[in-house]
Amino acid sequence: MRTPVMEVLRKSRSEVRAAVMDDYSRRCAGFSWGEARGWLDGLPGGAGLNIAHEAVDRHATGTQGERTALRWLGKQGRQRDISYRELASLSSRFANVLGELGVPPGAGVFLLAGRIPELYVAVLGALKHTAVVTPLFSAFGPEPIVTRMTLGEGRVLVTTASLYRRKIAPIRDRLGALEHVLVVRDDDGELPEDTHDLVARLDAASDVYTIPATDDETPALLHFTSGTTGKPKGALHVHQAVVAHYATARFALDLRPEDIYWCTADPGWVTGTSYGIIAPLCIGATLVVDEAEFDAEHWYDVLESEGVTVWYTAPTAIRMMMRGGSERARSRRYPALRFIASVGEPLNPQAVHWGVEAFGLPIHDNWWQTETGGIMIANFASLDIRPGAMGKPLPGIQAGVLRHLPDGGVEEVTRYGEEGELALRVGWPSMFRTYLNEDARYRRCFVDGWYLTGDLVRRDPEDYYWFVGRADDMIKSAGHLIGPFEVESALMEHPAVAEVGVIGKPDPVIGEIVKAFVALKPGFVSDESLRRELLGFARRRLGPAVAPKEIDIQSSLPRTRSGKIMRRLLKARELGLPEGDTSTLESAR
Ligand code: ATP
Ligand code: MG
């Protein structure tokens, strides 16, 4: 029997509400970023805000220092717990290694490794040294590595011996700026030529390091966007961003020092750095790091055996878990789990309901981008969840729904429910400072004091924001503007459907027709009768103007490495056009 979802949503909300310090309106009232800055320590002697100091050093002394900062779950059942004191010491050693190699502040330090402890040590150590840090997906092939390291002028690379041999050695002469490679030995081979043994260097280095004075505007992180809509852009973030990392983790994830927190995102994607490294450590929580790739059964194990309390994941993972039904999830116990959040793509209402069935908890959707550096809009712990809505703007964030005017200006739409481009008033601390080497493109993102996000939304009278679609993905059919999310969510309600991507296919009569690509749950067979059933199902739910006219059933849909369905690729393939930049395409799953 189906759980009465709305009842659970209400119950869960009131329980959480009792536990959180403030409700939404109290949090927003009187909030200022200046106040939030005061929640952090700053470097000794007024030397500024440094992300790594806030994340580790300030928790490293006294009994606090003994607490586990990072619990690493390795692939072969290995496990390593690193305390805050140890993480502070290891990251200082890494900063000293950079100093010994003569790496100056501001230099580009790239990381190409799976989720191993040294990756976390290197990110934090490089931030201490005020280098500019870029984690890459370890699954990247040669071209995405060369493009990104060239753009970011990577002078240092941290990787593993096996990845070095397979991926870097063949392209090393194309990495013109690269001076030092630090490798973690992960096989029995010799240390590759022209590289340093990272662990040996760490062992030999001093663990005393004084973080240089760090200005608010000192560059800290260079993150590449997911490449969902085109060639990835390099968004540059500064140390001041830590104010937003910390505050948003409290507001949107309800994260507290006693939490066992698991963010499933890879550090190669901005979520895996902002909320997979920095924010939870700034709070003083224990971070679970799982080295393994996605596997539903294993994930249930981690949630249960580690006693995860706060879990931050993404719709694509949730949909893959949903494929197996909620019984598998319900065969475990998660007494500690109290908050689940999701980001990266719209979260179908079906997924929010599944959270209740599977875990007894709803899933809190939140919205942000590589460019915003941190969560901007969220279903807060203390709010009613509206399944299908992204939530409300965080304290300190002023969002608007804009209409573009013919003269190039913008105005806010005044009617609730009207679609427009989601925009944010500039000035929050984690805002990107440029797209590297693409200044004109950066400047085009701003109009009249607004940052334009490229996403279309609606707002309801209680100020919840509802995602409609990316501006690039909107479908114009017979005079209607149709957002893919609405169509995808309707099809997701069919029991056979695991995943959907919807595009507009050019049509001489009505402009575009809606076409859906569907992947099925196990046990369902792709045949003509199911295809017809899906067409009818969508038509009944959406009406003939919005429902897809064509449905293709595929074994899987193209996704970015951050788990986003690449609609532009579905469209290019449908129309026989060039595929464009596919550097972030996850081909092997
Ligand atoms: P690119 O900019 O290279 O095309 P991308 O926009 O997918 O790639 P990210 O910065 O990783 O790169 O993703 C941000 C985008 O993801 C948002 O602009 C939005 O379209 C989508 N997104 C993130 N969270 C949500 C959410 N909760 N609901 C709907 N969409 C979301
Ligand atoms: Mg984008």
Image (cartoon, helix red, strand yellow):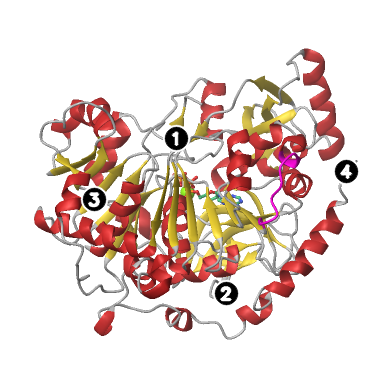
**Do the CB atoms of the residues marked 4 and 2 lie less than 8 Å apart?**
no
Does residue 342 appear left or right of residue 488 in this picture? Answer: left
Numbered label attached to residue 75:
1
Residue receiving disc 4: 2
Asked if 491 appears above or below 460 in the picture, the reply is above
**Counting other residues with Cα less than 10 Å from the Cα at mark 2, is it few (<14), some (14-19), or many (20 or more)?**
many
Give the distance between the C-alpha atoms of the residues marked 4 and 2, in whole angstroms.
Answer: 36 Å
Which secondary structure lies at badge 2? loop
Numbered label attached to residue 123:
none
**Do the CB atoms of the residues marked 2 and 1 lie less than 8 Å apart?**
no
Name the amino acid, label 2: Pro
Q: Is residue 412 magenta?
A: no
Give the distance between the C-alpha atoms of the residues marked 4 and 3, in whole angstroms.
Answer: 50 Å
Would you say the beta carbon of the disc 4 residue lies within 8 angstroms of ligand 1? no
Give the distance between the C-alpha atoms of the residues marked 2 and 3, in whole angstroms.
Answer: 33 Å
Residue receiving disc 3: 109
Mark toward the viewer: 2 or 3: 3
Mark toward the viewer: 4 or 2: 4
